[in-house]
Amino acid sequence: MIAFFLSRPQLGENIGAVARAMQNFGLKDLRLIAPRDGWPNPRAFDMATHATDILRQAGLFSTLADASGDVHRLYATTARGRDMNKPVLALEDAVEQMVAETAAGLKIGVVFGPERTGLENDEVAQCSTLLTIPTDPDNASLNLAQASLLVAYEWFKRAGQVRNLHATSSKHASFIAPEQQSPAATQAQIAGLLGQLEESLEAGGFFKTEAMRPRMWRNITNIFTRAGLSEQEVNTLRGVIRALRTYS
Amino acid sequence: MIAFFLSRPQLGENIGAVARAMQNFGLKDLRLIAPRDGWPNPRAFDMATHATDILRQAGLFSTLADASGDVHRLYATTARGRDMNKPVLALEDAVEQMVAETAAGLKIGVVFGPERTGLENDEVAQCSTLLTIPTDPDNASLNLAQASLLVAYEWFKRAGQVRNLHATSSKHASFIAPEQQSPAATQAQIAGLLGQLEESLEAGGFFKTEAMRPRMWRNITNIFTRAGLSEQEVNTLRGVIRALRTYS
Protein backbone atom coordinates (compact mmCIF):
# COMPACT_ATOMS: atom_id res chain seq x y z
CA MET A 1 0.00 0.00 0.00
CA ILE A 2 1.20 3.52 -0.68
CA ALA A 3 0.74 6.69 1.37
CA PHE A 4 -0.12 10.18 0.10
CA PHE A 5 1.68 13.17 1.58
CA LEU A 6 0.24 16.66 1.12
CA SER A 7 2.84 19.30 1.81
CA ARG A 8 1.40 22.64 2.93
CA PRO A 9 -1.97 22.23 1.19
CA GLN A 10 -3.86 25.51 1.01
CA LEU A 11 -7.55 24.77 0.53
CA GLY A 12 -9.48 22.41 2.76
CA GLU A 13 -11.63 21.49 -0.25
CA ASN A 14 -8.58 20.07 -1.95
CA ILE A 15 -7.62 17.98 1.05
CA GLY A 16 -11.13 16.57 1.00
CA ALA A 17 -10.91 15.88 -2.73
CA VAL A 18 -7.66 13.98 -2.23
CA ALA A 19 -9.26 11.85 0.49
CA ARG A 20 -12.15 11.15 -1.82
CA ALA A 21 -9.83 10.07 -4.63
CA MET A 22 -7.95 7.81 -2.22
CA GLN A 23 -11.18 6.21 -1.06
CA ASN A 24 -12.32 5.60 -4.63
CA PHE A 25 -9.16 3.63 -5.27
CA GLY A 26 -8.67 1.79 -2.00
CA LEU A 27 -5.95 3.94 -0.42
CA LYS A 28 -6.06 4.90 3.26
CA ASP A 29 -2.82 6.44 4.50
CA LEU A 30 -2.97 10.24 4.21
CA ARG A 31 -0.39 12.49 5.87
CA LEU A 32 -0.73 16.25 6.10
CA ILE A 33 2.23 18.54 6.44
CA ALA A 34 1.46 21.98 7.82
CA PRO A 35 -1.89 22.60 6.10
CA ARG A 36 -2.28 26.37 5.68
CA ASP A 37 -5.66 26.72 7.36
CA GLY A 38 -5.00 24.41 10.27
CA TRP A 39 -6.40 20.98 11.02
CA PRO A 40 -9.06 19.63 11.22
CA ASN A 41 -10.64 21.78 8.54
CA PRO A 42 -14.43 21.52 8.14
CA ARG A 43 -14.22 22.34 4.43
CA ALA A 44 -12.16 19.22 3.89
CA PHE A 45 -14.76 17.10 5.63
CA ASP A 46 -17.57 18.64 3.58
CA MET A 47 -15.76 17.86 0.36
CA ALA A 48 -14.73 14.34 1.27
CA THR A 49 -18.33 13.04 1.36
CA HIS A 50 -17.92 9.32 2.08
CA ALA A 51 -14.15 9.53 2.70
CA THR A 52 -14.17 11.23 6.10
CA ASP A 53 -12.58 8.22 7.80
CA ILE A 54 -9.42 8.88 5.84
CA LEU A 55 -9.41 12.49 7.03
CA ARG A 56 -10.03 11.51 10.64
CA GLN A 57 -7.13 9.10 10.56
CA ALA A 58 -4.80 11.40 8.60
CA GLY A 59 -1.46 12.10 10.28
CA LEU A 60 -0.55 15.73 10.95
CA PHE A 61 3.12 16.74 10.76
CA SER A 62 5.18 19.88 10.54
CA THR A 63 7.77 18.76 8.00
CA LEU A 64 8.11 16.16 5.26
CA ALA A 65 11.00 14.61 7.17
CA ASP A 66 8.81 14.15 10.27
CA ALA A 67 6.00 12.73 8.20
CA SER A 68 8.07 10.19 6.28
CA GLY A 69 10.32 8.61 8.88
CA ASP A 70 8.94 5.11 8.40
CA VAL A 71 8.86 5.30 4.59
CA HIS A 72 11.53 3.79 2.33
CA ARG A 73 10.98 5.66 -0.94
CA LEU A 74 9.36 8.98 -1.65
CA TYR A 75 8.11 10.04 -5.08
CA ALA A 76 7.85 13.78 -5.71
CA THR A 77 5.02 14.79 -8.01
CA THR A 78 6.20 17.69 -10.11
CA ALA A 79 5.01 19.31 -13.31
CA ARG A 80 8.16 21.06 -14.37
CA GLY A 81 11.60 19.55 -14.60
CA ARG A 82 13.93 20.29 -11.75
CA ASP A 83 17.56 21.04 -12.00
CA MET A 84 18.37 17.94 -10.02
CA ASN A 85 20.12 14.74 -10.87
CA LYS A 86 17.26 12.43 -10.02
CA PRO A 87 15.34 9.88 -12.06
CA VAL A 88 12.12 11.15 -13.65
CA LEU A 89 9.34 8.66 -14.36
CA ALA A 90 6.03 9.16 -16.11
CA LEU A 91 3.09 8.18 -13.92
CA GLU A 92 2.53 4.73 -15.40
CA ASP A 93 6.16 3.75 -15.12
CA ALA A 94 6.45 5.22 -11.65
CA VAL A 95 3.48 3.16 -10.52
CA GLU A 96 4.98 0.05 -12.02
CA GLN A 97 8.11 0.67 -9.99
CA MET A 98 6.06 1.34 -6.85
CA VAL A 99 4.23 -1.93 -7.28
CA ALA A 100 7.53 -3.79 -7.50
CA GLU A 101 8.87 -1.94 -4.48
CA THR A 102 5.83 -2.61 -2.31
CA ALA A 103 5.92 -6.26 -3.38
CA ALA A 104 9.48 -6.28 -2.05
CA GLY A 105 8.23 -5.00 1.32
CA LEU A 106 9.09 -1.33 0.95
CA LYS A 107 6.84 1.44 2.19
CA ILE A 108 6.18 4.06 -0.49
CA GLY A 109 5.05 7.67 -0.27
CA VAL A 110 3.84 10.02 -2.99
CA VAL A 111 4.38 13.68 -2.16
CA PHE A 112 2.16 16.46 -3.50
CA GLY A 113 3.12 20.12 -3.10
CA PRO A 114 0.96 23.16 -2.35
CA GLU A 115 -1.55 24.22 -4.99
CA ARG A 116 0.22 27.27 -6.33
CA THR A 117 3.88 26.72 -5.86
CA GLY A 118 4.49 22.98 -5.93
CA LEU A 119 7.13 21.30 -3.84
CA GLU A 120 10.16 23.17 -2.61
CA ASN A 121 13.54 22.00 -3.81
CA ASP A 122 14.45 20.92 -0.29
CA GLU A 123 11.44 18.62 -0.28
CA VAL A 124 12.18 17.23 -3.72
CA ALA A 125 15.71 16.52 -2.53
CA GLN A 126 14.32 14.13 0.08
CA CYS A 127 12.61 12.07 -2.61
CA SER A 128 14.20 9.25 -4.57
CA THR A 129 12.29 9.82 -7.79
CA LEU A 130 10.38 12.54 -9.64
CA LEU A 131 6.94 11.56 -10.88
CA THR A 132 5.41 13.48 -13.78
CA ILE A 133 1.94 13.04 -15.18
CA PRO A 134 1.87 13.23 -18.97
CA THR A 135 -0.39 16.05 -20.18
CA ASP A 136 -0.82 18.26 -23.17
CA PRO A 137 2.45 20.20 -23.13
CA ASP A 138 0.66 23.53 -23.54
CA ASN A 139 -1.60 22.88 -20.55
CA ALA A 140 0.47 20.98 -18.08
CA SER A 141 -0.99 22.36 -14.87
CA LEU A 142 -3.03 19.79 -12.98
CA ASN A 143 -4.52 20.77 -9.66
CA LEU A 144 -4.11 18.79 -6.47
CA ALA A 145 -7.42 16.95 -6.79
CA GLN A 146 -6.62 15.96 -10.37
CA ALA A 147 -3.06 14.84 -9.75
CA SER A 148 -3.95 12.76 -6.70
CA LEU A 149 -6.86 11.15 -8.55
CA LEU A 150 -4.68 10.09 -11.46
CA VAL A 151 -1.98 8.64 -9.23
CA ALA A 152 -4.57 6.75 -7.16
CA TYR A 153 -6.27 5.45 -10.30
CA GLU A 154 -3.08 4.17 -11.89
CA TRP A 155 -2.05 2.60 -8.61
CA PHE A 156 -5.39 0.84 -8.28
CA LYS A 157 -5.30 -0.44 -11.85
CA ARG A 158 -1.75 -1.65 -11.70
CA ALA A 159 -1.82 -3.12 -8.19
CA GLY A 160 -5.03 -4.88 -9.12
CA GLN A 161 -3.41 -6.43 -12.17
CA VAL A 162 -0.55 -7.67 -10.04
CA ARG A 163 -2.97 -9.12 -7.47
CA ASN A 164 -4.77 -10.95 -10.26
CA LEU A 165 -1.48 -12.15 -11.65
CA HIS A 166 -0.54 -13.56 -8.26
CA ALA A 167 -3.87 -15.24 -7.94
CA THR A 168 -3.68 -16.94 -11.31
CA SER A 169 -0.01 -17.82 -11.60
CA SER A 170 2.41 -18.33 -8.78
CA LYS A 171 5.27 -18.15 -11.26
CA HIS A 172 5.08 -14.39 -11.17
CA ALA A 173 4.63 -14.20 -7.44
CA SER A 174 7.98 -12.66 -6.59
CA PHE A 175 8.72 -9.44 -8.36
CA ILE A 176 12.00 -8.54 -6.81
CA ALA A 177 14.36 -11.12 -5.44
CA PRO A 178 15.80 -9.33 -2.45
CA GLU A 179 18.55 -11.94 -2.13
CA GLN A 180 20.09 -11.64 1.30
CA GLN A 181 20.28 -7.91 1.09
CA SER A 182 20.00 -5.64 4.04
CA PRO A 183 16.52 -4.08 4.19
CA ALA A 184 16.03 -0.71 2.59
CA ALA A 185 16.80 2.25 4.81
CA THR A 186 13.85 4.31 5.98
CA GLN A 187 13.68 8.04 5.41
CA ALA A 188 14.41 8.47 9.13
CA GLN A 189 17.61 6.46 8.86
CA ILE A 190 18.70 8.47 5.84
CA ALA A 191 17.85 11.67 7.67
CA GLY A 192 20.06 10.50 10.55
CA LEU A 193 22.95 9.92 8.17
CA LEU A 194 22.47 13.30 6.53
CA GLY A 195 22.28 15.02 9.90
CA GLN A 196 25.59 13.52 10.91
CA LEU A 197 27.12 14.50 7.59
CA GLU A 198 25.87 18.07 7.72
CA GLU A 199 27.14 18.57 11.23
CA SER A 200 30.52 17.16 10.25
CA LEU A 201 30.74 19.32 7.15
CA GLU A 202 29.93 22.39 9.15
CA ALA A 203 32.69 21.55 11.60
CA GLY A 204 35.03 21.03 8.66
CA GLY A 205 34.27 24.42 7.15
CA PHE A 206 32.69 22.94 4.02
CA PHE A 207 29.97 25.53 3.62
CA LYS A 208 32.01 28.51 2.58
CA THR A 209 29.18 31.04 2.67
CA GLU A 210 25.70 30.88 4.14
CA ALA A 211 24.33 32.04 0.78
CA MET A 212 25.69 28.99 -1.02
CA ARG A 213 24.83 26.57 1.72
CA PRO A 214 21.23 25.62 0.83
CA ARG A 215 22.12 24.73 -2.72
CA MET A 216 25.27 22.87 -1.79
CA TRP A 217 23.43 20.89 0.85
CA ARG A 218 20.56 20.09 -1.49
CA ASN A 219 23.01 18.72 -4.04
CA ILE A 220 24.53 16.43 -1.43
CA THR A 221 21.12 15.35 -0.13
CA ASN A 222 20.11 14.42 -3.65
CA ILE A 223 23.01 12.04 -4.06
CA PHE A 224 22.07 10.01 -1.03
CA THR A 225 18.28 10.00 -1.41
CA ARG A 226 18.70 8.82 -4.97
CA ALA A 227 20.94 5.91 -4.18
CA GLY A 228 18.33 3.54 -2.72
CA LEU A 229 20.45 2.95 0.38
CA SER A 230 20.03 -0.12 2.55
CA GLU A 231 20.19 -0.01 6.32
CA GLN A 232 23.60 -1.57 6.19
CA GLU A 233 24.84 0.99 3.72
CA VAL A 234 23.61 3.81 5.93
CA ASN A 235 25.60 2.31 8.78
CA THR A 236 28.63 1.93 6.52
CA LEU A 237 28.44 5.57 5.45
CA ARG A 238 28.08 6.69 9.05
CA GLY A 239 31.25 4.75 9.78
CA VAL A 240 32.90 6.41 6.79
CA ILE A 241 32.08 9.86 8.14
CA ARG A 242 33.39 8.97 11.59
CA ALA A 243 36.58 7.59 10.10
CA LEU A 244 37.17 10.66 7.96
CA ARG A 245 36.60 12.93 10.90
CA THR A 246 39.15 11.16 13.05
CA TYR A 247 41.76 11.71 10.36
CA SER A 248 43.98 14.70 10.84
CA MET B 1 -10.36 13.43 -31.60
CA ILE B 2 -13.23 12.67 -29.26
CA ALA B 3 -16.02 14.91 -27.94
CA PHE B 4 -17.39 15.10 -24.39
CA PHE B 5 -21.15 15.36 -23.87
CA LEU B 6 -22.52 16.55 -20.52
CA SER B 7 -26.14 15.64 -20.16
CA ARG B 8 -28.10 17.91 -17.80
CA PRO B 9 -25.11 18.91 -15.65
CA GLN B 10 -26.14 20.56 -12.41
CA LEU B 11 -23.25 22.60 -11.06
CA GLY B 12 -21.43 25.19 -13.15
CA GLU B 13 -18.26 24.35 -11.21
CA ASN B 14 -18.38 20.84 -12.59
CA ILE B 15 -18.75 22.03 -16.16
CA GLY B 16 -15.68 24.18 -15.62
CA ALA B 17 -13.78 21.25 -14.14
CA VAL B 18 -14.60 19.11 -17.16
CA ALA B 19 -13.33 21.83 -19.50
CA ARG B 20 -10.16 22.04 -17.47
CA ALA B 21 -9.60 18.30 -17.67
CA MET B 22 -10.16 18.39 -21.43
CA GLN B 23 -7.67 21.20 -21.86
CA ASN B 24 -5.06 19.32 -19.80
CA PHE B 25 -5.31 16.41 -22.18
CA GLY B 26 -5.69 18.13 -25.52
CA LEU B 27 -9.46 17.75 -26.04
CA LYS B 28 -11.55 20.63 -27.34
CA ASP B 29 -15.05 19.54 -28.32
CA LEU B 30 -17.48 19.99 -25.41
CA ARG B 31 -21.26 19.76 -25.84
CA LEU B 32 -23.73 20.73 -23.16
CA ILE B 33 -27.21 19.28 -23.02
CA ALA B 34 -29.72 21.32 -21.02
CA PRO B 35 -27.48 22.46 -18.17
CA ARG B 36 -29.66 22.97 -15.09
CA ASP B 37 -28.56 26.55 -14.31
CA GLY B 38 -28.60 27.85 -17.88
CA TRP B 39 -25.71 28.84 -20.09
CA PRO B 40 -23.29 30.59 -20.02
CA ASN B 41 -22.70 30.05 -16.33
CA PRO B 42 -20.09 32.29 -14.65
CA ARG B 43 -19.24 29.60 -12.08
CA ALA B 44 -18.11 27.36 -14.91
CA PHE B 45 -15.81 30.05 -16.26
CA ASP B 46 -14.36 30.72 -12.80
CA MET B 47 -13.55 27.04 -12.36
CA ALA B 48 -12.12 26.49 -15.82
CA THR B 49 -9.13 28.82 -15.27
CA HIS B 50 -7.13 28.51 -18.51
CA ALA B 51 -9.76 26.42 -20.30
CA THR B 52 -12.34 29.13 -20.94
CA ASP B 53 -11.92 28.81 -24.72
CA ILE B 54 -13.43 25.36 -24.52
CA LEU B 55 -16.42 26.76 -22.63
CA ARG B 56 -16.90 29.64 -25.07
CA GLN B 57 -16.91 27.22 -27.98
CA ALA B 58 -19.05 24.60 -26.26
CA GLY B 59 -22.18 23.63 -28.14
CA LEU B 60 -25.52 24.01 -26.34
CA PHE B 61 -28.30 21.51 -27.11
CA SER B 62 -31.56 20.40 -25.64
CA THR B 63 -31.25 16.64 -26.13
CA LEU B 64 -28.51 14.08 -26.58
CA ALA B 65 -29.93 13.23 -29.99
CA ASP B 66 -29.63 16.86 -31.12
CA ALA B 67 -26.15 17.11 -29.74
CA SER B 68 -24.77 13.98 -31.35
CA GLY B 69 -26.03 14.13 -34.92
CA ASP B 70 -22.57 14.20 -36.48
CA VAL B 71 -21.10 11.53 -34.20
CA HIS B 72 -20.68 7.89 -35.18
CA ARG B 73 -20.35 6.19 -31.81
CA LEU B 74 -21.38 7.25 -28.32
CA TYR B 75 -19.96 5.77 -25.13
CA ALA B 76 -22.13 6.05 -22.02
CA THR B 77 -20.18 6.47 -18.79
CA THR B 78 -21.97 4.62 -16.08
CA ALA B 79 -21.04 3.40 -12.63
CA ARG B 80 -23.68 0.74 -12.19
CA GLY B 81 -24.52 -1.99 -14.63
CA ARG B 82 -27.59 -1.48 -16.79
CA ASP B 83 -30.08 -4.06 -17.74
CA MET B 84 -29.30 -3.63 -21.38
CA ASN B 85 -27.83 -5.88 -23.96
CA LYS B 86 -24.89 -3.65 -24.73
CA PRO B 87 -21.17 -4.18 -24.51
CA VAL B 88 -19.56 -2.95 -21.28
CA LEU B 89 -15.92 -1.97 -21.45
CA ALA B 90 -13.56 -0.89 -18.70
CA LEU B 91 -12.06 2.53 -19.35
CA GLU B 92 -8.75 1.34 -20.74
CA ASP B 93 -10.37 -1.07 -23.16
CA ALA B 94 -12.99 1.46 -24.18
CA VAL B 95 -10.29 3.97 -25.00
CA GLU B 96 -8.41 1.41 -27.04
CA GLN B 97 -11.52 0.83 -29.07
CA MET B 98 -12.10 4.59 -29.47
CA VAL B 99 -8.58 5.01 -30.77
CA ALA B 100 -9.17 2.33 -33.36
CA GLU B 101 -12.48 3.89 -34.33
CA THR B 102 -11.11 7.39 -34.74
CA ALA B 103 -8.23 5.97 -36.75
CA ALA B 104 -10.87 4.51 -39.03
CA GLY B 105 -12.39 7.98 -39.49
CA LEU B 106 -15.26 7.70 -37.03
CA LYS B 107 -16.29 10.55 -34.76
CA ILE B 108 -16.61 9.48 -31.13
CA GLY B 109 -18.51 10.96 -28.19
CA VAL B 110 -18.32 10.16 -24.48
CA VAL B 111 -21.51 10.94 -22.58
CA PHE B 112 -21.57 11.88 -18.90
CA GLY B 113 -24.81 12.05 -16.96
CA PRO B 114 -25.99 14.49 -14.29
CA GLU B 115 -24.14 14.49 -10.98
CA ARG B 116 -26.73 12.76 -8.83
CA THR B 117 -28.71 10.51 -11.08
CA GLY B 118 -26.46 9.50 -13.93
CA LEU B 119 -27.69 8.94 -17.45
CA GLU B 120 -31.27 8.00 -18.16
CA ASN B 121 -31.94 4.69 -19.82
CA ASP B 122 -33.14 6.49 -22.94
CA GLU B 123 -29.79 8.20 -23.22
CA VAL B 124 -27.84 5.03 -22.56
CA ALA B 125 -29.88 3.38 -25.27
CA GLN B 126 -28.48 5.88 -27.80
CA CYS B 127 -24.95 4.81 -27.00
CA SER B 128 -23.11 1.93 -28.63
CA THR B 129 -21.11 0.96 -25.59
CA LEU B 130 -21.10 1.30 -21.82
CA LEU B 131 -17.90 2.61 -20.30
CA THR B 132 -17.10 1.85 -16.66
CA ILE B 133 -14.16 3.16 -14.70
CA PRO B 134 -12.64 0.53 -12.40
CA THR B 135 -12.72 1.65 -8.76
CA ASP B 136 -12.70 0.13 -5.34
CA PRO B 137 -15.98 -1.81 -5.34
CA ASP B 138 -17.01 -0.35 -1.97
CA ASN B 139 -16.52 3.23 -3.14
CA ALA B 140 -17.49 3.32 -6.77
CA SER B 141 -18.95 6.80 -6.94
CA LEU B 142 -16.82 9.14 -9.00
CA ASN B 143 -18.00 12.68 -9.51
CA LEU B 144 -18.23 14.37 -12.89
CA ALA B 145 -14.88 16.12 -12.59
CA GLN B 146 -13.16 12.88 -11.63
CA ALA B 147 -14.76 10.72 -14.30
CA SER B 148 -14.08 13.20 -17.10
CA LEU B 149 -10.47 13.61 -15.97
CA LEU B 150 -9.82 9.88 -16.03
CA VAL B 151 -11.35 9.42 -19.47
CA ALA B 152 -9.39 12.38 -20.87
CA TYR B 153 -6.18 11.09 -19.31
CA GLU B 154 -6.53 7.58 -20.71
CA TRP B 155 -7.44 8.98 -24.10
CA PHE B 156 -4.40 11.23 -24.12
CA LYS B 157 -2.08 8.43 -23.07
CA ARG B 158 -3.42 5.94 -25.54
CA ALA B 159 -3.84 8.27 -28.50
CA GLY B 160 -0.37 9.61 -27.82
CA GLN B 161 1.10 6.13 -27.93
CA VAL B 162 -0.65 5.42 -31.20
CA ARG B 163 0.45 8.68 -32.78
CA ASN B 164 3.88 7.77 -31.49
CA LEU B 165 4.30 11.32 -30.27
CA HIS B 166 6.58 10.34 -27.48
CA ALA B 167 9.69 9.30 -29.30
CA THR B 168 11.62 8.54 -26.15
CA SER B 169 10.78 5.33 -24.42
CA SER B 170 9.71 6.08 -20.89
CA LYS B 171 10.07 2.48 -19.80
CA HIS B 172 13.26 3.15 -17.93
CA ALA B 173 14.14 5.89 -15.56
CA SER B 174 15.78 8.64 -17.51
CA PHE B 175 17.98 10.91 -15.49
CA ILE B 176 16.74 14.40 -16.07
CA ALA B 177 19.04 16.50 -18.19
CA PRO B 178 17.94 20.12 -18.04
CA GLU B 179 20.13 22.82 -19.50
CA GLN B 180 22.30 23.49 -16.49
CA GLN B 181 22.56 19.85 -15.51
CA SER B 182 26.14 18.74 -15.22
CA PRO B 183 27.04 15.88 -17.58
CA ALA B 184 27.18 12.38 -16.20
CA ALA B 185 30.45 11.49 -14.56
CA THR B 186 32.73 9.13 -16.42
CA GLN B 187 33.91 5.91 -14.85
CA ALA B 188 37.33 7.55 -14.58
CA GLN B 189 35.95 10.46 -12.59
CA ILE B 190 34.13 8.10 -10.27
CA ALA B 191 37.29 6.05 -9.90
CA GLY B 192 39.15 9.22 -8.95
CA LEU B 193 36.59 9.97 -6.28
CA LEU B 194 36.75 6.42 -4.95
CA GLY B 195 40.53 6.49 -4.89
CA GLN B 196 40.50 9.64 -2.82
CA LEU B 197 37.92 8.12 -0.49
CA GLU B 198 39.78 4.86 -0.04
CA GLU B 199 43.02 6.59 0.74
CA SER B 200 41.28 8.83 3.26
CA LEU B 201 39.52 5.92 4.92
CA GLU B 202 42.75 4.07 5.25
CA ALA B 203 44.34 7.07 6.90
CA GLY B 204 41.32 7.30 9.22
CA GLY B 205 41.60 3.67 10.31
CA PHE B 206 38.27 2.69 8.75
CA PHE B 207 39.30 -0.76 7.56
CA LYS B 208 39.65 -2.57 10.85
CA THR B 209 41.07 -5.78 9.44
CA GLU B 210 42.52 -6.63 6.08
CA ALA B 211 40.19 -9.64 5.92
CA MET B 212 37.08 -7.47 6.06
CA ARG B 213 38.45 -4.81 3.78
CA PRO B 214 37.48 -6.14 0.34
CA ARG B 215 33.87 -6.61 1.29
CA MET B 216 33.60 -3.28 3.07
CA TRP B 217 35.13 -1.49 0.14
CA ARG B 218 32.88 -3.24 -2.35
CA ASN B 219 29.85 -2.11 -0.37
CA ILE B 220 30.99 1.48 -0.47
CA THR B 221 31.85 1.30 -4.16
CA ASN B 222 28.36 0.01 -4.86
CA ILE B 223 26.72 3.00 -3.30
CA PHE B 224 28.51 5.49 -5.49
CA THR B 225 28.41 3.58 -8.76
CA ARG B 226 24.70 3.05 -8.37
CA ALA B 227 23.86 6.69 -7.83
CA GLY B 228 24.28 7.94 -11.42
CA LEU B 229 26.61 10.71 -10.32
CA SER B 230 27.18 13.81 -12.42
CA GLU B 231 30.58 15.46 -12.85
CA GLN B 232 29.51 18.21 -10.53
CA GLU B 233 28.41 15.74 -7.90
CA VAL B 234 31.74 13.98 -8.07
CA ASN B 235 33.43 17.31 -7.42
CA THR B 236 31.04 18.02 -4.57
CA LEU B 237 31.79 14.68 -2.97
CA ARG B 238 35.51 15.23 -3.32
CA GLY B 239 35.04 18.52 -1.50
CA VAL B 240 33.03 16.70 1.16
CA ILE B 241 35.88 14.27 1.76
CA ARG B 242 38.41 17.08 1.96
CA ALA B 243 36.24 18.97 4.43
CA LEU B 244 35.74 15.93 6.63
CA ARG B 245 39.45 15.25 6.65
CA THR B 246 40.31 18.74 7.81
CA TYR B 247 38.03 18.28 10.79
CA SER B 248 39.76 17.27 13.97
Image (cartoon, coloured by chain):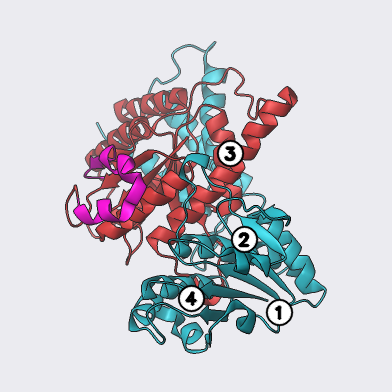
Chain colours: A red, B cyan
* Residue A213 in sight from this viewpoint: no
Disc on res. A159: 3
Quarter of the rendering containing residue B35: bottom left
- Of B188 and A237, nearer the camera is A237
Judge the density around disc 4: few (<14), some (14-19), many (≥20) Cα neighbours within 10 Å.
many
Task: Name which residue lies at 68% across and 76% down.
Answer: B1
Q: Is residue B61 above or below residue B150?
A: below
Q: Which residue is mark 2?
A: B154
What residue type is disc 4 on?
Ala
Task: Name which residue lies at 52% across and 73% down.
Answer: B7
Q: Chain of mark 1?
A: B
Q: CA distance from mark 3 to mark 2?
A: 17 Å
Question: Of helix, strand and loop, which one carries label 4?
Answer: helix
Residue A61 within the segment the image draws in magenta: yes
What residue type is disc 1 on?
Val
Q: CA distance from mark 3 to mark 1?
A: 36 Å
Q: Which residue is mark 1?
A: B71
Q: Which residue is mark 4?
A: B19
Q: Chain of mark 2?
A: B
Q: CA distance from mark 1 to mark 2?
A: 20 Å
Q: Which comes sooner in the sequence, label 2 or label 4?
A: 4
Q: Which residues are magenta?
A: A41-63
What residue type is disc 2 on?
Glu
- Of B90 and B243, nearer the camera is B90
Question: Of helix, strand and loop, which one carries label 3?
Answer: helix
Mark 1 vs mark 4, foreground winner is 1
